[in-house]
Amino acid sequence: MKIAFFDTHQFERNFFQKENEKFGHDITFFETRLTEQTANLAAQYPCVCAFVNDRLNSKTLNSISANGTRLIALRSAGFNHVDMKVACDLGLHVVRVPEYSPHAVAEHAVALILSLNRKIHRAYGRVREGNFSLDGLVGFDLYKKTVGVIGTGRIGAVFAKILAGFGCQVIAYDRVQNSELLTAGVQYVSLNELLKKSDTISLHVPLTPETRHVIDEKALALTKKGVMLINTGRGALIDTRALIESLKSGHIGYAGLDVYEEEEGIFFENLSDQILQDDQLARLLTFPNVLLTSHQAFLTDEALGNIAHTTLQNITEFEKGNILSNQNVRAKHLKR
Ligand code: NAI
């Protein structure tokens, strides 16, 4: 099938090219993001392959639909960047990669915790400058600390088990309880209790209208002074303005962020020779106790291989008229 690939990056291209030797699709890689301005590039492509910062709003969807696209293959788990109602109304099928490596993301969240706690990001720079002093690098034992996990789906569950292995007391909040975690000693509590009791809080819920700004000014006020906040979910789970205020006041002890509310157009790009125009992001980068990565939690060999395989498999299923294993629920009734 002819596929227009948007927001393509060097780190993923080889995985798709190699995997496509088995599937034989006709792929055109575009480096540009898919937006209402670039949607015309998809003309005559029955399939559009999109990534997390492509903007699949009503205008974009109407444009690609009018130009003959019938399938949107997301090479991501999250689908908060697609207006699903409009896609459904237009008869556009949307498939995604619901699971590619929960371990990749969970392990990155743990990497953020360990780096922030033991100040590895600061120590790395110091010793390379010949500064072998230890002042300012004091961390804490994770052992016996309380770690709060918001969202114990695929990623949150792996994360909870890793932290349990460190000897942490793991508490969790989710609307569904995971029996395996209960057996492993994880205790489910209300969101408020989790916010009040946790030394470290890690976010693993999807971004939905209900979870948007789940960490806002009120939630932050409930947390312990010195709390560590980790977000590998989606940027808008946290109200960035409130986070900055809480960091400035010294209430938040550490923030490890792999995602950012306004990351679209910034993350995944090399902007090192430009003036950063996002003042909130610029402010976040000034805090010594903030560690920011550019939406890279998924970035492992295993995850990239699985993303390429499942994406191309999803497209083949559509092409052959087979049942779509990874179609978004809302659109399942659509005719083909
Ligand atoms: P999942 O669907 O397996 O788990 C999500 C969990 O959140 C479920 O247990 C669900 O019950 C819970 N949940 C949803 N809404 C809730 C609410 N309003 N209140 C309480 N609990 C709620 O998803 P998975 O695979 O664990 O991924 C989680 C998120 O991680 C994705 O939606 C995505 O946004 C993000 N992600 C980030 C990546 C990165 O590279 N930084 C890579 C992959 C995913």
Image: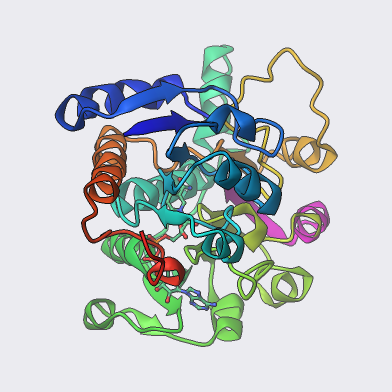
Q: Report the magenta residues as a range.
A: 242-257
Any magenta on residue 256? yes
Left or right side of 23 for 53: right
User: Which residue corresponds to the image point at 58% horizontal and 58% vertical from the top-left?
Assistant: 228
Specify whether 315 is left or right of 237.
Answer: left
Q: Is residue 172 above or below residue 233?
A: below
Front-most of residues 61 and 100: 61
Q: Quadrant location of residue 242?
A: bottom right
Depicted 145 relative to depicted 79: above or below: below
Q: Position of residue 258 (x, y in %)?
A: 55, 44
Q: Residue at x 21, y 29 (%)?
A: 19
Q: Quadrant of ligand 1?
A: bottom left
Q: Which residue is at a point 28% across and 65% down the rendered structure image?
A: 161
Residue 190: x percent and y percent? 53, 87
In the displayed structure image, the side of residue 323 where residue 121 appears, left or right: right
Extreme residue in the left direction: 22
The foreground one among 117 and 133 is: 117
Label tally: 0
